[in-house]
Each structure stands twice: as structure tokens, then as C-alpha cells.
Image: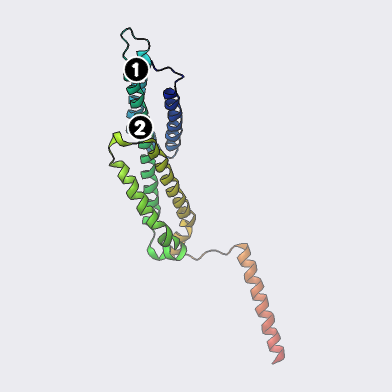
């Protein structure tokens, strides 16, 4: 009999708490994540296997420990798949946001304002995209707890890149439209000082001549 205080149950509880936090954080990113059917299916399956394990303790024709251990293994597998499904959905959303931000910007504007996009980030985006798409084609029964951490790492990398893009986006749009950047107070002050210096130099040269 698998007791509620057993190490197996503790692992399930800790994994579920981690997966739940991930799923909620992913849902906060956008409405699409709230309707991720794959996540709901996996959580429902996890609950079913978990309750089979628990109800077996109170059944008159209870099955052996191996049955319960198998139910715990299946519960764990479905929780992992729920977390990974949520993370895959989020990673695709972030990639779509990056694409949306950059697709309307021409190469000249990018090169002028944000040259690091070509030298540093575009290759990282390509590699991350390839790795994430591998997960979308991965068989459902070969997800592991390590995959959760790998996906989180990739998503964090993509979100940081997108933050860099969005920080440079207004200037890229401005350059693309040919709009001159307005003077700030500091720039106006510096310009006035330079003008006064040049005026003073001009007057001095006039006196010498």
C-alpha cells in the first residue's frame, strides 16, 4: 500500500506544485494559454491515475503495490506533460511576439539602431526555435522532469531577447519612417552651449582680424 506520507507521494506533490506554478505563470502571458486543451487533458489524466492509487487503499478487492506504483508513475508522467505542454505553448507565443515585432522593420533600421540583433540575437532565436519545435514533435511518453527546466531556460532566453527588441522598437520605427529624433532638454542645452562657444570664438577671431 502506498501511504500518503510515502516518498513517492511527496515527489508527486512537489512536482504538482511546480507544474501548477508554471501553468499559472504561462496563463498570465495571454488568453491563448488559458485555453490550452493539451494541458487540461494531461491534468485530468494525472488526477485520474492519482485517484486510482488513493481509492485502491479503500477497495475491498485492492490490487497489489505494483498497481499503485504504476498509477503514481503515470500520475507523474501526466503532470510533467502538462507542464511541458504549457511551456511549449508559451514559447511559441513568445516566438510569435518576436516575429510580430521584427517583421515590419526593415534591415536598414535594424542595422542602424539595433545591430546586435544580427550579430548576437538572430542566431540564438533560430537555435531556440529549432529546439522548441523538437519538443512539439516529441512523443508524449518521453518527456522528463529535466525537460521542464530546459524549456524554462529557453523561454527566459527568448523573453530577454524580446525585451531588448521592444526597448529598441520605437527608435527602429522612427528610423524606418525617416522621423528625426526630437531634442531632449539635455540635447537642447548642449546645443545652446556649443552655439555660444562658437559665437564667442567667432567674435574673438573678428577682433583679432
Residue 40 lies in quadrant: top left
Q: Residue furthest bottom?
A: 209
Residue 163: % across, % down: 47, 51
Q: Which residue is mark 2?
A: 39
Determine whether, in the image, residue 140 is placed left or right of residue 83: left
Q: Quadrant of the N terminus?
A: top left
Which numbered circle lies on residue 115?
none
Looking at the image, how many numbered discs can be counted on the residues?
2
Residue 51: % across, % down: 36, 18
> Residue placed at 48% from the left, 60% from the top?
171
Q: Is residue 35 visible?
A: no
The local secondary structure at tag 2 comes to: helix
Q: Quadrant of the C terminus?
A: bottom right
Earlier in the chain: of badge 2 and badge 1, it is: 2
Which numbered circle lies on residue 65?
1
Check disc 1: other Cα within 10 Å, few if <14, some if 14-19, many if 20+.
Answer: some
Amino acid at each position: 500500500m502506498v501511504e500518503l506520507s510515502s516518498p513517492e507521494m511527496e515527489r508527486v506533490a512537489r512536482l504538482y506544485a511546480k507544474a501548477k506554478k508554471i501553468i499559472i505563470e504561462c496563463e498570465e502571458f495571454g488568453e491563448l494559454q488559458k485555453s490550452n486543451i493539451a494541458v487540461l487533458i494531461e491534468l485530468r489524466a494525472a488526477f485520474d491515475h492519482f485517484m486510482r492509487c488513493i481509492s485502491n487503499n479503500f477497495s475491498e478487492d485492492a490490487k497489489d503495490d505494483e498497481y499503485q506504483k504504476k498509477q503514481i508513475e503515470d500520475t507523474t508522467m501526466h503532470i510533467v506533460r502538462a507542464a511541458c505542454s504549457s511551456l511549449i505553448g508559451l514559447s511559441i507565443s513568445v516566438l510569435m511576439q518576436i516575429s510580430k515585432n521584427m517583421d515590419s522593420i526593415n534591415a536598414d533600421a535594424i542595422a542602424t539602431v539595433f545591430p546586435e540583433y544580427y550579430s548576437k540575437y538572430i542566431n540564438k532565436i533560430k537555435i531556440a526555435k529549432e529546439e522548441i519545435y523538437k519538443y512539439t514533435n516529441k512523443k508524449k511518453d518521453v518527456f522528463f522532469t529535466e525537460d521542464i527546466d530546459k524549456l524554462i531556460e529557453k523561454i527566459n532566453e527568448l523573453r530577454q531577447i524580446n525585451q531588448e527588441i521592444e526597448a529598441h522598437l520605437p527608435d527602429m520605427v522612427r528610423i524606418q519612417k525617416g522621423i528625426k529624433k526630437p531634442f531632449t532638454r539635455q540635447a537642447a542645452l548642449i546645443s545652446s552651449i556649443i552655439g555660444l562657444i562658437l559665437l564667442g570664438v567667432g567674435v574673438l577671431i573678428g577682433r583679432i582680424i
